[in-house]
Image (spheres, rainbow, N blue to C red):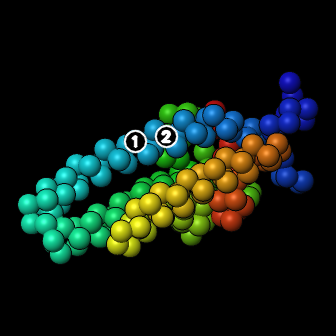
Amino acid sequence: MSATTDPHFYQREGAGPAIAEAEVWQRAVARLVDHVGVAVVLMVVLLPLGLGAAVLGGAAGFLAGVVSAVVSAGVTLGYFAVLESRDGQTLGKRLLGLRVVDEVGGTPSLSATLRRNCWTALGVLAVVPVVGGLVGSVAMLVAVVTILLGITQDSVTRRGWHDTLAGTRVVRAR
């Protein structure tokens, strides 16, 4: 199937050659690989903090939870934003042959990738006592579901709200 007849190819008027948009499953697997990698790093980094909080308890335990939530949100957002603004690829996207591009097919700016991935920092809501963890988890679930719905409903560019907000899209790199 040629680029002009395949609905998964997208070409802006006056732009260069058509670019193949990434499939939903490819994007989901790449994101899963990335989140597993980030989770492993966070477990190693935050394990001493958690052990200290368990020993100390009370206010120290609460403070450790706040620090953990902030560090987790910062590391997660930073991972996606920095790598996608550097060369358009995280480890997961590289493994799946995907790349994040801006409106003209170039590497997106750091500010664009921060907007694109802002939802990954919703875990910081865990700092709110008692209900924060639940609220943050539900907010992230809603973000993921609405992103998936947006991608599946946009049959031409396959952009979720996060891509529209950032002026980006995910394409096949190979």
Identify which residue is drawn at 54% across, 61% down.
Answer: 139
* Mark 2 to mark 1 CA distance (whole Å): 6 Å
**Left or right placement of residue 56 versus residue 49 in this view:** left
The circle on residue 32 is: 2
Secondary element under disc 1, as helix, strand or loop, is helix
Q: Amino acid at mark 1?
A: Val
Q: Amino acid at mark 2?
A: Leu
**Left or right placement of residue 60 versus residue 158 in this view:** left
Write down the quadrant of residue 142 in the picture.
bottom right
Give the percent coordinates (x, y) of residue 80.
Answer: 48, 55
The circle on residue 36 is: 1
Q: Is residue 60 above or below residue 37?
A: below
The answer to whether any part of residue 89 appears in the image is yes
Q: Is residue 129 above or below residue 26?
A: below
Write down the quadrant of residue 36 in the picture.
top left
Q: Residue furthest top?
A: 1
Secondary element under disc 2, as helix, strand or loop, is helix
Identify which residue is drawn at 30% across, 52% down.
Answer: 42
The circle on residue 151 is: none
Label tally = 2
Q: Mark 2: few, some, or many residues within 10 Å (few <14, many ≥20)?
A: few
Write down the quadrant of residue 59 in the picture.
bottom left
Q: Nearer the viewer, residue 93 or 60?
A: 60
Give the percent coordinates (x, y) of residue 46.
Answer: 23, 56
Check if mark 2's residue and mark 1's residue have beta carbons within 8 Å: yes
Give the percent coordinates (x, y) of residue 2.
Answer: 87, 28
